Image (tube, helix red, strand yellow):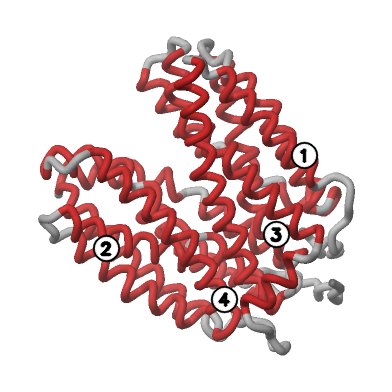
Amino acid sequence: MTTAAPRPSARLPVVPIVALGLLTVVAYGAAFYSYGVLIAPIAAETRWPQAALGAIFSAVLLITGVGGILAGGLLDRVGEQPVFAVGATLSAAAVLASSYQTQLWSFALLYAGGCGLAGALGFYHVTQTVAARVATGAAARAIIWLTLIGAFAGPIYLPLTGWLSSTVGWRGAIRVHAVSLAVAFALALLLVRGRGGRPSPTRREGAVRALRRALRERPMQRWLAATVITGAATDVVLLYQVPAMVGLGLPLSLAAGLAGFRGAAQLAGRLPLGPVITRLGARRTIIAVLVLAALSLPLLLASGAVAVALAFAFVFGAATGAFSALQGIYTHELADPAHLGTLLGTQQALFELGGALGPVTAGALLGATGSFVPMVSLASVSLLAAGALLLRWSGRTVPPEAGA
């Protein structure tokens, strides 16, 4: 696949990028991060089983993954306006309606549907695609700045949801989330319109045909395989970091605080990406990030010492932060611009698939061995294997952007 080099752009379109960043913060915050805070107060008030409440989150991820592919195809066909309009109305309305339910089945249906739709329409696979199209010739810089803003989703919504739950209750917290989703999607709809956030004007194939064609290309095959593996390894660490640290002797409050520090450290991984990509290219940068993440994991096994735990949280957080930005940047390099939404949606869905499979395997290892060592070792080897998949070939090369 060959494509003309992008036209350099000296300035980024600040207003639409900020609007997309705000949407990213709200979508991830309301539809992903906040639910972990809500489970305990929901269970305490309703007496609904914890297992059923946990299954609702799994349903959110499933709807996000499958819906993301469909949303990407819609984005490629008609642009971002209908996508954001559905998010501002149907997604927000379903989340709002869920807060009034007194039966588990109706709450699960509306909450999983609303949050899953918000994820499908507002997670990075959508906002990175639109950012790349808005910033013609400066896609990498646009995605980096978008993900810098998006990194605040957890730091904002986790404490906000905790405070709301303690002041207005979990139902009130969900209502605030619904309003924030409606506002964020509406702002993105209004502020991106007319600023270049449109699909490629070239003739487009159907989404299925375009996906089949992309999957026949070895660079895309290896990239998607690496995505599944990385999603599995990353979610294993995210799920078991706190239990591993507690098992090594850290207090629960400190271990949880270090998990928050790991999330904040994502910014450190994203800030230097522009010059690093200019020097190494996106593919080599991804390999370096995966190797760094893999080499940091032995520190988790020695995190009974606070200094070592801090080092692990910072390095692994920075690596995963960089990878989330690089996902959009590198897929943009490999994909036909006319089908970027479809391919980014597929890539996101596969990352979620890996994220669902990894913890199951890790849990089985932990149950069989009673030790975190095999689990962490497997995650480290998996990250190295994902990097190795990207080593011995060259994908479509896009010259570095001016000022990236």
The residue that mark 2 highlights is: 95
Q: Secondary structure at mark 2?
A: helix
Circle 4/circle 1 CB separation < 8 Å: no
Q: What amino acid does circle 1 point to?
A: Ala
Between label 2 and label 3, give the one nearer the viewer. Answer: 2
Upstream in sequence: badge 3 or badge 4: 4
- Drawn side of residue 209 relative to residue 374, left or right: right
How many labels sit on residues? 4
The residue that mark 3 highlights is: 329
The residue that mark 1 highlights is: 288
Q: Residues within 10 Å of mark 4 (few under 14, many from 20)?
A: many
Quarter of the rendering containing residue 8: bottom right
Disc 2 from disc 4: Cα separation: 24 Å
Q: Secondary structure at mark 4?
A: helix
Disc 4 from disc 1: Cα separation: 31 Å
Disc 3 from disc 4: Cα separation: 18 Å
Circle 1/circle 2 CB separation < 8 Å: no
The residue that mark 4 highlights is: 73
